[in-house]
Image: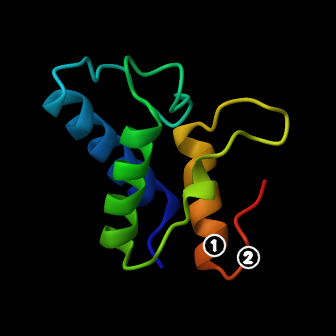
Amino acid sequence: MPDRDKIIASVIALVEGIQSASGRSHEGISGQTSLFGDIDGFDSLNGLEMLVMVGASLETDLPEQMLRPMSNGASVTVGDLVERILKQMEGHDGDN
């Protein structure tokens, strides 16, 4: 199973690629960055695109529910998404 740091690096690289291809800034993205709100112009369609690409790189299907807000209503961060992915890969539902 891939480790957390490698998945974070992969998600960040994919988000940066999407941002760059869209002509938007991709500076300062980290594990604490909220996918929706902290990244200029990054929307749910971009999130789904990134999720499909991450799933393909990990050879697993990642449901769109991975992008839903946290239980406290906060937008999912890169780190939160990675935790959900790891939980799913361990056989849990990835909910948190």
Task: Establish if 66 lies above or below 25.
Answer: below
Residue 70 x %, y %: 75, 41
Residue 28 x %, y %: 37, 20
Q: Which mark is residue 92?
A: 2
Kindly identify the residue that appears in the image at 47 percent across and 74 percent down.
61
Q: Amino acid at mark 1?
A: Gln
Residue 46 x %, y %: 36, 40
In-image side of 82 versus 40 (left or right):
right
Task: Establish if 91 lies above or below 27.
Answer: below
| Residue nearer the viewer, 63 or 60 | 63
- Identity of the residue furthest to the front in this view: 45
Kindly identify the residue that appears in the image at 44 percent across and 50 percent down.
8
Kindly identify the residue that appears in the image at 36 percent across and 50 percent down.
50
Picture quadrant where residue 75 is located: top right
**Cβ–Cβ below 8 Å for labels 1 and 2?**
yes
Residue 83 x %, y %: 63, 56
